[in-house]
Amino acid sequence: MTDLLRLSWRYLWSRPLATVLNLWLLTLGLATVGFVLQARSAVDRAFARDLAGIELVVGAKGSPMQLILAGVFHMDVPPGNIPLAEVQTLAQHPMVAQVVPLSLGDNLQGYRIVGTTPDYPALYGMQLAAGIWWARPMEAVLGARVAAATGLGEGQGFVGAHGLGRGGAVHEEAAYHVTGVMAPCGCVLDRLVLTPTESVWQVHDDMHGAADMDAEDLAALQADREVTIALVRYRSPLAAATLPRLINDSTGLQAAAPAVEVTRLLSMLGVGTRVLQAAGAVLLLVAGLSVFMALWHAVRERAADLAILRLLGAGPGRVTALLLLEALWLAMLACGLGLLLARGLWWALARQLADDPSGVVAMAPSPLLLAGVPLLALAVVFLAVLLPAIEAYRQDVHPSLNPRS
């Protein structure tokens, strides 16, 4: 067996140009397939991670997709605000188990400041890396990425800026106090600043001169409190079939189911992955045909060598095994290079998109995800070598040794 392995290796590199070409085509095809598998897995895991059991998102009338992107993934601008009174009414509905309000509008160096309740980090099972959770308005807890990017920590202060992106007017008169920093979770909370809902109201009350209002105007302002979005969890599975339609038809609110919208979003993203999958399939097909042609011609060119091996006592099976081992060497080399290239491409993408707000590339794909790539390499090479191997097995020794006969 050792002799066969050594001989098949030498045969493989007896045609270096053809071998390198076949190896390169196989490597590109396998790397493309491996990269697509990693990308699709990372996207699926990122969406599942950020949904965190959220079953319904309620906000102002507008696009359901925009509502999901703004309220769950914090990647879009919300369509507007909704009255706090309607959210409180929704929380009392018998089909609703939990309502978590979110109030948006300000940012810290581009990271969103979210007014909410302790139920929001509890959805993700968040733990603190330092400090304590907030206890009163104008206290804040930073996500891990926010703390790393801003250099802020427990006991320090900061002021927010108006708007959801950089460049807004700074609220110099309303300073936050950092009470804690959340442990990294690889989820959306890593890039958020959490604070009580009352903090957001207080900042904007100050901006509109609430301190100079009389009691009647101040009472009217407080009666018209708003939040941006409400995250809802159902009390029973039956609510999923009736509550969204009830909200959309009988209230001034918009209800969007994350599962439905994420499925739509993945179907749109799936077009790109299918294109890459098709490109990988074409490369593997071309590589398979190239390997087939190379091995087919090799059998014809080595007819005399194979005949001598037969005369020296090698049976048809050993001669066929020689060709199969040559193809196996090619598959193993292509598989190793393809896996390295696929992982290298993902690493390069992660470096390039290190500040990606979605955090998708931060989801390191499991190495087990690429376990099918070696099988794919073996399948392509096996199909390519099948006919040449049969030809080698059935080859007649005498015409090769007596070409004039």
Image (tube, rainbow, N blue to C red):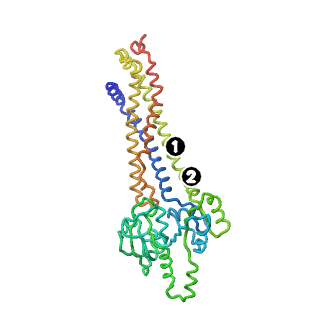
Query: In the rendered view of the protein, which quadrant contains the N terminus?
Result: top left
C-alpha gap between disc 1 and disc 2: 16 Å
Q: Which residue is mark 2?
A: 267
**Residue 149 spot, x, y in % from top left:** 37, 66
Tell me the SS state at disc 1.
helix
Name the residue rendered at 44%, 18% in the picture: 395
**Residue 328 spot, x, y in % from top left:** 40, 31
Is 361 placed left or right of 231 in the picture? left
Compared to residue 389, the image places residue 25 above or below, namely below
Name the residue rendered at 38%, 44% in the picture: 340
- Farthest residue to the top: give it: 405
Tell me the SS state at disc 2.
helix
Q: Which residue is mark 1?
A: 278
Compared to residue 224, the image places residue 213 above or below, namely below
Query: In the rendered view of the protein, which quadrant contains the C terminus?
Result: top left
**Amino acid type, callout 1:** Ala
Note whether residue 94 is visible.
Answer: yes
Note whether residue 51 is visible.
Answer: no
